């Protein structure tokens, strides 16, 4: 996830993730239509919307944790190769 200068990276990614997974909300829309047509309880609509939101939140959290784990820079290590020359071995023209 790209971090913006305003610090709204997580919320923006969550909203985009919910948009990309909109097919999960289609079940809630169908259940809402069945509620008005056949009189089913509205509880099923809220369950479907909750599953959609929690799934998108879970995927966003996993991606943000993976991003945070991969952003640490590797510290510079000394050259231990005996066949390579270091900068100190070259004569400097001063």
Image (spheres, rainbow, N blue to C red):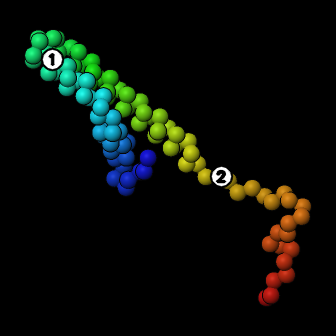
Q: Would you say residue 40 is visible in this rendering?
A: yes
Between 76 and 33, the one nearer to me in the picture:
33
Q: Is disc 2 in contact with disc 1, using a CB cutoff of under 8 Å? A: no
Between 38 and 11, the one nearer to me in the picture:
38
Residue found at x 41% / y 30%: 58
Residue found at x 33% / y 35%: 21
38 vs 10: above or below: above
**The label number, if any, that marks residue 74 in the structure image:** 2
90 vs 51: above or below: below
Residue at the bottom extreme, as displayed:
94
**The label number, if any, that marks residue 45 in the structure image:** none
Mark 1 packing: few (<14 Cα in 10 Å), some, or many (20+)? some
18 vs 1: above or below: above
Mark 2 packing: few (<14 Cα in 10 Å), some, or many (20+)? few
Q: Would you say residue 14 is visible in this rendering?
A: no
Q: In the visual, does 36 lie left or right of 30?
A: left
Quarter of the C terminus within the rendering: bottom right
* 2 or 1: tag closer to the N-terminus: 1
Q: How far from the left and from the top, in percent, is residue 50?
A: 29, 23
Q: How far from the left and from the top, in percent, is residue 1?
A: 44, 47
Count all numbered tags in the image, as a single digit: 2
Q: How far from the left and from the top, in percent, is residue 56?
A: 36, 32
Residue found at x 15% / y 11%: 40
Between 9 and 25, the one nearer to me in the picture:
25
Q: How far apart are marks 2 and 1 (CA)?
A: 56 Å
Q: Which image quadrant for residue 85? A: bottom right
| 2 vs 1, front mark | 1
Residue at the right extreme, as displayed:
82
Q: How far from the left and from the top, in percent, is residue 80?
A: 84, 57
Q: Is mark 2 on a helix, strand or loop?
A: loop
Which residue matches tag 1?
34
Q: What element carries label 1?
A: helix
């Amino acid at each position: 996830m790209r971090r913006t200068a305003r610090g709204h990276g997580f919320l923006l990614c969550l909203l985009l993730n919910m948009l990309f997974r909109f097919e999960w909300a289609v079940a809630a829309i169908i259940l809402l239509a069945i509620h008005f047509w056949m009189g089913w309880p509205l509880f099923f609509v809220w369950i479907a919307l909750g599953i959609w939101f929690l799934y998108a939140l879970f995927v966003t959290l996993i991606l943000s944790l993976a991003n945070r784990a991969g952003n640490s820079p590797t510290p510079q290590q000394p050259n231990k190769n005996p066949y390579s020359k270091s900068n100190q071995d070259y004569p400097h023209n001063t």
